Image: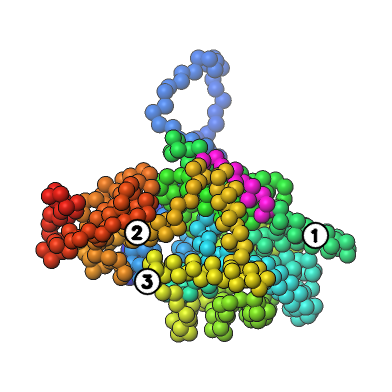
Amino acid sequence: MRNLILSMGSSGSLCMLLLCLSWNGAKSEMLPSKPSPNVTNKEPLQDHPEASPSEEKLNLPMFTMDYPRIQMPFELTLWVLLACFAKISLHVYPKITIWIPECCLLIVIGFIGGAVMHYVREEPLPILDSNVFFLYMLPPIVLGSGYFMPTRPFFENVGTVLWYAVVGSLWNSAAIGLSLYGICHIELFGVQDINLQENLLFGCIVSTLDPVAVLSVFEDIGVNEQLHIVVFGEGIFNDAIVVVLYNMLTFVAEMPAVHVTDLYLGVARFFLVGLGAVLLGFLFSIVAAFTTRFTANTRSIEPLFILLYSYLAYLVAELFAISSLLTIVTCGITMKYYVEQNISAQSCTTIRQVLTMLATISETLIFFSLGVAIITMDHEWNLAYILFTLLFALLWRVLGVLVLSQIAKPFRTFQFDFKEQLGLACSGLRGSLCFALAFTLPDSIQRRKLFITASICIIIISIFTQGLSMRPIVECMNFRRTNKELKTINVENHKRLMEHVVVGIEDLCGQWSHHYWKDKFKKFNNRVLGRILVPDSQPESSIVALYKKLQLEKAMELLETPVGDLSTVPPGVSLPLKLLCRGQCCASISTRQDTTEVVDSLSTVVDSLSGTVPVSGGPSSGGRKDWPDPPLTRHLSQVSPGEGHPVDLQGDGEKTEF
């Protein structure tokens, strides 16, 4: 702990010092120069004529400084650098971030930075300006969430995800807003000037969800896949729905009177904005996939197409005032399936790293701004309004999850028990989007400062209470876990067999579920979309494709283990593959540019080590023959860990050393 504090101090103090110096330098240039008290102004003597301006001698300056010209990018760079130092400091001891969510630590660092800024009497950068937030900081966060979403579990639970996200968001916004409007009629609390529209707007703001801390706990513990994907998907689509409501209610709050026709128009606009966003995101994803079909000779610009098309879809959605978040989420989800078949492995890695970096920096700066705002802002306090907001947010969230779960129960095969429903309710943390929406409220809202103060209090309480207690709660309740060790060809084949059986049974019974639509989409994709968007889209044997995928995943896991340390290899991995990844073959395979060559080379060597070899060509040829005496069996007893030993892989007398 002492080393962590020292590392955080050493990394953060440098940026804080530079920020203070930059602010002081800016102030010094803005101050007018004062005459010295010892110098008196005297009239020039008439005997000596004044020199003309043209006769003044100009010398070449040795040192100049123009800080106002670079003030904004300079200070922004220092903030980003401080964010990077904070991330490094927080991960010096990984056990700390296991029990304390990262967002809590970032808020504490921002709180310290805000105290320093308050001491030097400086204003923070306008990071959370409305245009800056919605046009630059929010898109990478949402795009990363949509692009990294597990596709198969999501579409298997898409109905449940949308049920909790859409209906749950409307439920929480309306219930919190109406409840607070009832509190405003009590004269004792002194909030009679807050009307119904403003209460609904504030209820919409505090209905946002930020389950990042909860998802990290779920991933570490290994909670079942159904609960994980519902929490993940609800958090993404909840943000999109809430932003749509926020834009509508912001306009309504400025209206002098609301009529019945306005309500009908609002409902129609809500569905129009949602459907239009989905269609627009799907259109841009198709265009992006079709473009990457022709980038085989220009691999270096492939990641740029993905980022530009996604951001262009977001901007077009903002242009037509439809849900830009839902547009970029849809674009990221649908784009990934086709794009990753066209681009190289290096481009896939670049896209993932860039999206993760941009999303991390944006979220870090938002949490920094939250910590700074606690100190530097002028708050308006109303304890009763803040406490009732916290109570209603928790109460209606729990009741909403329980009621919606009971309604969805007859339509789900995998049922959530009472403990998992409570875990789903407790995952409703408020985070960066809640603070950003409150901070970007228009100045026409009379109680804007009260709304910002209440939002900050709810975020701090939910993050520091629910975030810190989520891991002990999950471990004590003993949620159903996911067995990650069953990822074998046998298990996957049985899953696919059961899916085909279920489709046949549903077809005979006349019922259409997600299995039926998944089978229809596969056929449509193989016949139409795949041939248009993917070059040479001739589907190979599903068994061979699954074999390649599993072998590549195992090899990637082994490449991350220490060289020669077989005890750290995950269970279920064959010894030939362990010996392969200990050798020099992995160094050459990992530098290939074509994913197909990587998989073929890896599969060929694994087949050689395991005693089978393809009849012709690579592993996609299908037919195989067995060796009477596999060379690995002959030499396995002579191989000792940490020592190289020659093995005759081909049986022709030429030995390869491992």
Q: Which residue is mark 1?
A: 268
Residue that appears at 84% across and 62% down: 264
Percent coordinates x, y for residue 250 in the rendering: 74, 59
Q: Can you give x and y, in whole percent of width and height, for residue 109 in the image?
A: 45, 63
Q: Nearer the viewer, mark 1 or mark 3?
A: 3
The part of the image, by quadrant, that contains residue 366 is bottom right
Disc nearer the start of the sequence (3/2): 3
Q: Position of residue 126 (x, y in %)?
A: 58, 51
> Which of the pair 170/16 is nearer the observer?
170
Which label was assigned to residue 551?
2
Could you classify mark 1 by the number of other residues whose Cα lies within 10 Å: few (under 14), some (14-19), or many (20 or more)?
Answer: few
Mark 3 neighbour class, 10 Å CA radius: few under 14, some 14 to 19, many 20 or more? few
Tag 3 and tag 2, C-beta contact below 8 Å? no
387 in magenta: no
Residue 195 is situated, as x and y percent measured from the top left of the image, at: 80, 69
Q: Amino acid at mark 2?
A: Gln
Residue in the foreground of this view, choosing between 180 and 28 = 180
Q: Main secondary structure of the magenta part?
A: helix
Magenta range: 277-293
Mark 1 or 3 closer to N-term? 1
Residue 485 is labelled as: 3
Q: Amino acid at mark 1?
A: Ala
